Each structure stands twice: as structure tokens, then as C-alpha cells.
Image: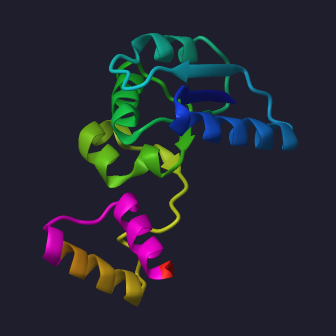
Amino acid sequence: VAVVWANTEFGKGAHTAFMDEAKNYGFEIVADLPTEQAQTDFSADVVKLKGIEADAAFVYLTEEESARFLREARKQGVTLPLVGETTLIGHKVIELAGDAANGAMGHVGLTPDANIPAMTDMVERFKQKYNYTPDHNAIKGYTAAHAI
């Protein structure tokens, strides 16, 4: 497994957690590729990724960085599975990356598309108030406010 991650406070926690779990499951980490904050050019990282033999790549970047990374990965013909969190496959990433987001996989705790009455209600009220579909950040904020 290759790991592409944001070398920031945002990314370090996820990187540490992923590396610990990868070790627990016996995954071999064949590349550990930290990126810079707000990085705009991922061509060198993608070249490195293409030069190794990995079964998949775990990608943990911000949404904007994820979109740029996905566009570059598709441009260079990367075919290995790209797996991540919501920040790899969220609405904003899909909007920014377009077709380059096709095939990316990730964990989504809760989505505005969930066919759950409480979620449908929240999404409709959010859209009426803010005039756009809530993303994972809005859902987390809504959930946190109601938990308190």
C-alpha cells in the first residue's frame, strides 16, 4: 500500500492512525509520500506513485488537494485503487475533479443522499437556509450542535 498524505496537523493524525492500523493488519507500506500544505502540483508525487508496485494508495489530503491529486493521477494514467476518507470523495472533490474522481473510494460516515428521514429533513432545511446541499462538514456541525 502506498500512502499519500498532507504533511500538516490535519494530515499527521490520520497518517499516524493509518500507519498503526496498517501494521496491525500486516499491510506492507511500499511508499510513504507526504505532501505540502495547499500543494497545487502533484505531478512529481504521481510519478513516484506510478514507479512503485502497490496494490492501492491511501490518499488523505484536503478536498481541494484531493481534487488536484485525482486530476493529476488520471492525467498520468494511474489505475491502482485510490482509497481515502470523505475528503477524497466528497461533493466538493467531485465538483472540482470532475470525471477524475470516478473510481475513487472512501469511507463516508453520513451523506446528504442517505435515505433517512432525519437526514432528508436536515438537508431540506439546510438547502432552504443556505441555498446549497450540505457537505460532510455541515453534517458534522449539525450533528455536534444537536448532540450538545
| Residue 36 coordinates in the image, percent (x, y) | 46, 20
User: On screen, 37 above or below 91?
Assistant: above
Residue 39 in sight:
yes
Q: Which quadrant, please, contains the N terminus?
A: top right
Q: How is the image coloured?
A: rainbow
Q: Residue at x 36, y 71 (%)?
A: 113
For residue 112, side relative to residue 45 (left or right):
left
| Residue 82 coordinates in the image, percent (x, y) | 53, 37
For residue 69, side relative to residue 98 (left or right):
right
| Residue 52 coordinates in the image, percent (x, y) | 64, 15
Q: Residue at x 40, y 67 (%)?
A: 141
Task: Give yes or no for residue 87 being in the magenta stretch.
Answer: no
Residue range (magenta): 128-146
The answer to which of 65 and 113 lies nearer the viewer is: 65
For residue 15, side relative to residue 60 (left or right):
right
User: On screen, 15 above or below 75?
Assistant: below
| Residue 51 coordinates in the image, percent (x, y) | 59, 11
Considering every residue shown, the one lying at the far bottom of the view is 117
